[in-house]
Amino acid sequence: MKLSKGKAGGKPRSVYLEISFWRDGNTIHVAHNDPEGPSTFHVAVRADGSKPSGHPYLYRELSKCLDRMGAE
């Protein structure tokens, strides 16, 4: 994980993460494992906006990226 610089020595407003994402049926999983600590981030994104993890726009954009990179 890399932190951006904060204003005048304050806390940063953004971080840079190395993430993995993959498609599993109608779900795209997004994950990050922090090599410097025990924290792990994992979230599932679905195309169906009526589902709790549904986010049609994000699903579509991630799916396009997977397609461009040649993922299944």
Image (spheres, rainbow, N blue to C red):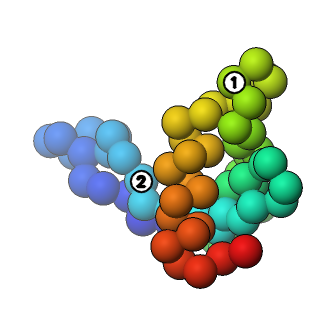
Q: Mark 1 points at which residue?
A: 49
Q: At x 74% / y 54%, what residue is drawn?
A: 29
Asked which secondary structure carries label 2, the reply is: strand
Relative horizontal placement of residue 43, taking residue 1 as reference (left or right): right
Label whose residue precedes the other's in the sequence (2 or 1): 2
Disc number at residue 13? none
Q: Please, which residue is most extreme toward the right here?
A: 25
Which residue is more in the foreground, 65 or 37?
65
Contact check, label 2 and label 1, Cβ < 8 Å:
no
Q: Please, which residue is most extreme toward the top here?
A: 50
User: Does residue 18 sit above or below 29 in this rendering?
Assistant: below
Q: Mark 2 points at which residue?
A: 15
Q: Quadrant of residue 48?
A: top right
Which residue is more in the foreground, 35 or 61?
61
What is the three-letter code of the residue carrying label 2?
Val
- Counting from the top left corner in percent of width and height, residue 13 is at 33, 40
Quote the CA–CA distance across marks 2 and 1: 28 Å
Q: Crowding near pointer 2: few (<14 within 10 Å), some, many (20+)? A: few
- Counting from the top left corner in percent of width and height, residue 52 is at 79, 23
Whether residue 28 can be seen here: yes
* Image quarter hosting the C terminus: bottom right
Q: Quadrant of residue 43?
A: top right
Asked which secondary structure carries label 1, the reply is: loop
- Counting from the top left corner in percent of width and height, residue 53 is at 75, 31
Closer to us: mark 2 or mark 1? 1
What is the three-letter code of the residue carrying label 1?
Gly
User: Does residue 55 sit above or below 60 in this rendering?
Assistant: above
Q: At x 67% / y 63%, what residue is drawn?
A: 21
Which residue is more in the foreground, 57 or 9?
57
Q: Please, which residue is most extreme toward the left here?
A: 8
Q: Crowding near pointer 1: few (<14 within 10 Å), some, many (20+)? A: few
